[in-house]
Image (cartoon, grey):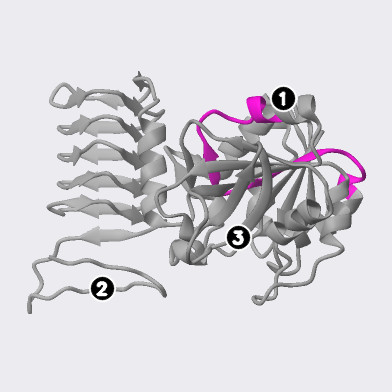
Amino acid sequence: MKALVLSGGKGTRLRPITHTSAKQLVPIANKPILFYGLEAIAEAGIKEVGVIVGDTADEIRSALKDGSRWGINITYIQQEAPLGLAHAVKIARDFLKDDDFVMYLGDNLIKDGLKEQIAQFVKNKPNAQILLAKVPHPENFGVAVLKDSKVINLEEKPKQPKSDLALVGVYMFDKNIHTAVNSIKPSDRGELEITDAIQYLIDNNYTVSPHIVQGWWKDTGKLDDMLEANRLILDTILTDTRGTVDSASNIEGKVVIEKGAKVVNSSIRGPAIIGENAEIINSYIGPFTSIYFNVKIENSEIEHSIVLENSTIKDIKRIGDSLIGQNVQISHTEKKPAAYRIMVGDSSKLEII
């Protein structure tokens, strides 16, 4: 069995972060999102992995390399434009051949991995198996309708959903999916939709089986979901101190302090993680906060947030529920006239008190 991992999307819902970085490489608990998926694929025993790349191909290649760190072999497949999930299957035909495969959207997180789902697919041998999760607002997702433990209908973001079962970004297929993707036409948004390809299988009497995800699942394409995923992952960490903490500092709960990090006269309340070579000085780091490498936080308070590499926060009273990008500087000023002085990129969001 092979894996096809999609990491070519533009990440418009996470701009401006994704103007300069692939959305699949934004870290959750100081590990790029995409790494969690590759770990799950490797844990399930899959060795051959095709990675669909787009505009951020160089960044993805630099991060993943040949895949040997996970014990897998990566083949990169260039997609000239984001033309749909079914299009990704279509252009990966030479890599996939007639093998069964799991298709995994690179910005998804599934708590319990993929071993159980893949074992079910191998045992029951349906033509396709889709992962589903119950959600409170199914109108925002692709929705599946079941009958007698089989999928009988798929709807893409229906105004009046017939079920609360949303499509999770993981699919398993046998070779018949290639017939399906070559039989459908682009949707109104100009993409070859995987939901249309799966519906083709249903309409032509192929077997499409569901697997209901019991643990949590997160599509990290939006800020709120990314912060929630960060919270869920941090809740699983174990205390580990490889950096230095001075005697004037206070560490409470589950906290990871990575190599080269320094905590000086500060309070850190876990779960939280402080990245390599970060400096926390006279500050408070609250629960569910991930500080990436080479970050400096001084005379400030921050909680329930993610701070990316090489950023500086100084003399700021309180930051919460935030995603702060790379190389950002946030500081208090005494300059006159008193005013907010802001430089932000396209699609940014600020809430000021």
Residue 98 left/right relative to 273 = right
Q: Which residue is mark 2?
A: 342
Badge 2 element: loop
Using a 10 Å C-alpha cutoff, classify the residue at mark 1 as few (fewer than 14 neighbours), some (14 to 19) or many (20 or more): few
User: Which residue occupies 60% across, 60% down?
Assistant: 155
Upstream in sequence: badge 2 or badge 1: 1
Could you tell me which quadrant the N terminus lies in? top right
Q: Which residue is mark 3?
A: 155
Residue in the foreground of this view, choosing between 227 and 170: 170
Upstream in sequence: badge 2 or badge 3: 3
Kindly report the distance in space between the C-alpha atoms of the residues bearing marks 2 and 1: 52 Å
The quadrant where residue 180 appears? bottom right
- Residue 117 within the segment the image draws in magenta: yes
User: Which residue occupies 66% across, 30% down?
Assistant: 117
Q: Which mark is residue 119?
A: 1
Kindly report the distance in space between the C-alpha atoms of the residues bearing marks 2 and 3: 43 Å
Residue in the foreground of this view, choosing between 26 and 195: 195
- Residue 125 within the segment the image draws in magenta: no
Magenta-colored span: 95-119
Kindly report the distance in space between the C-alpha atoms of the residues bearing marks 3 and 1: 27 Å
The kind of residue tagged 3 is Glu
List x then y, in percent, for residue 77: 79, 54
